[in-house]
Image (cartoon, rainbow, N blue to C red):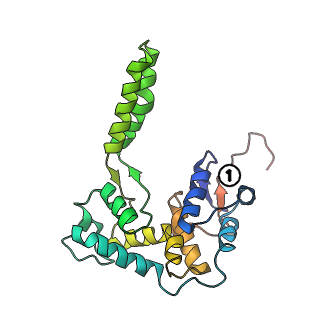
């Protein structure tokens, strides 16, 4: 059976495309995207926008490693090496880590994983104003409750993805999510490097592992057949 990323087409596919575009620093035309049904077809669009020759000779992962190590070493009592546990940066809040990666390193941090507290805050933003309004309270009473929920959400801690267990894992994800920017600064970006970065980005949007994503993998989940429909 052909595997699928499991996207439902309820804007999760739009989020994936935006993430891919940001990683490679490109824009894909809507009509081209609409004709893509598999991972391989989407990658062909990206590959067509790669430079004719690799844009540099440096390794994107190595470039990312030295840049992040220089910025993050002051926050760790342990020498940061690829196999160093990410716990060495445990004293550094994830929000601050993201800010350092973005502002000091000029790269894209890993996806933000919202904590349980953050999920509850989002629920407050939606549910509390509606509940207060439903029991007859005026809008100016419900509005501050929404502001409270937004404030709690912004203060809620975020987490790194579960697969980030070592400093090397962090480097790999940041390098893949920033491959276009790194290529513009001298990193190699041939088809091999592009595919590795591409599948890394896709793995953030699916339950499939990176190794399970192949060109034949469908982008959208197959819709179940109606009862009585011929097979």
Q: Can you name the residue that lies furthest to the top here? A: 136
Q: Residues within 10 Å of mark 1 (few under 14, many from 20)?
A: some
| Residue 163 visible, this angle | no
Residue at screen point 58% across, 50% down:
12
Left or right: 205, with 128 as reference point: right
Residue 209 locus on image (x, y percent): 51, 65
Left or right: 120, with 228 as reference point: left
Picture quadrant of residue 199: bottom right
Residue at screen point 70% across, 59% down:
29
| Residue 182 visible, this angle | yes
Of residues 199 and 141, the one drawn nearer to the viewer in this rendering: 141
Of residues 107 and 80, the one drawn nearer to the viewer in this rendering: 107
Number of numbered tags placed on the structure image: 1
Rendered view: 141 above or below 121: above
Of residues 113 and 209, the one drawn nearer to the viewer in this rendering: 113
Residue 32 locus on image (x, y percent): 74, 60
Residue 111 locus on image (x, y percent): 44, 57
Left or right: 112, with 192 as reference point: left
Question: In which quadrant will I find the N terminus?
Answer: bottom right
Rendered view: 154 above or below 174: above
Q: Which residue is mark 1?
A: 222
Q: Tell me the SS state at disc 1.
A: loop
Left or right: 107, with 215 as reference point: left
Q: Can you name the residue that lies furthest to the left here? A: 77
Residue 107 locus on image (x, y percent): 43, 67
Residue at screen point 23% across, 77% down:
79
Residue at screen point 49% across, 75% down:
182
Q: Can you name the residue that lies furthest to the bottom here? A: 57
């Amino acid at each position: 059976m052909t595997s699928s990323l499991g996207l439902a087409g309820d804007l999760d596919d739009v989020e994936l495309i935006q993430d891919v575009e940001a990683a490679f620093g490109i824009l894909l035309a809507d009509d081209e995207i609409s004709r893509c049904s598999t991972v391989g077809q989407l990658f062909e669009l990206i590959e067509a926008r790669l430079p004719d020759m690799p844009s540099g000779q440096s390794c994107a992962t190595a470039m990312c490693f030295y840049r992040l190590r220089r910025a993050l070493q002051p926050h760790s009592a342990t020498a940061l090496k690829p196999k160093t546990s990410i716990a060495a940066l445990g004293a550094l809040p994830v929000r601050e880590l993201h800010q350092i990666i973005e502002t000091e390193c000029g790269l894209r941090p890993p996806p933000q994983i919202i904590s349980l507290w953050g999920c509850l805050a989002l629920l407050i933003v939606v549910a509390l104003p509606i509940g207060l309004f439903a029991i007859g309270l005026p809008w100016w009473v419900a509005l501050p409750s929404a502001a409270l929920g937004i404030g709690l959400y912004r203060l809620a801690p975020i987490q790194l993805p579960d697969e980030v267990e070592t400093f090397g894992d962090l480097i790999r994800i940041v390098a893949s999510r920033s491959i276009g920017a790194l290529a513009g600064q001298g990193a190699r970006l041939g088809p091999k490097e592009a595919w590795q970065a591409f599948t890394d980005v896709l793995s953030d949007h699916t339950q499939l592992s990176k190794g399970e994503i192949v060109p034949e993998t469908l982008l959208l989940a197959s819709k179940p057949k109606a009862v009585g429909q011929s097979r």
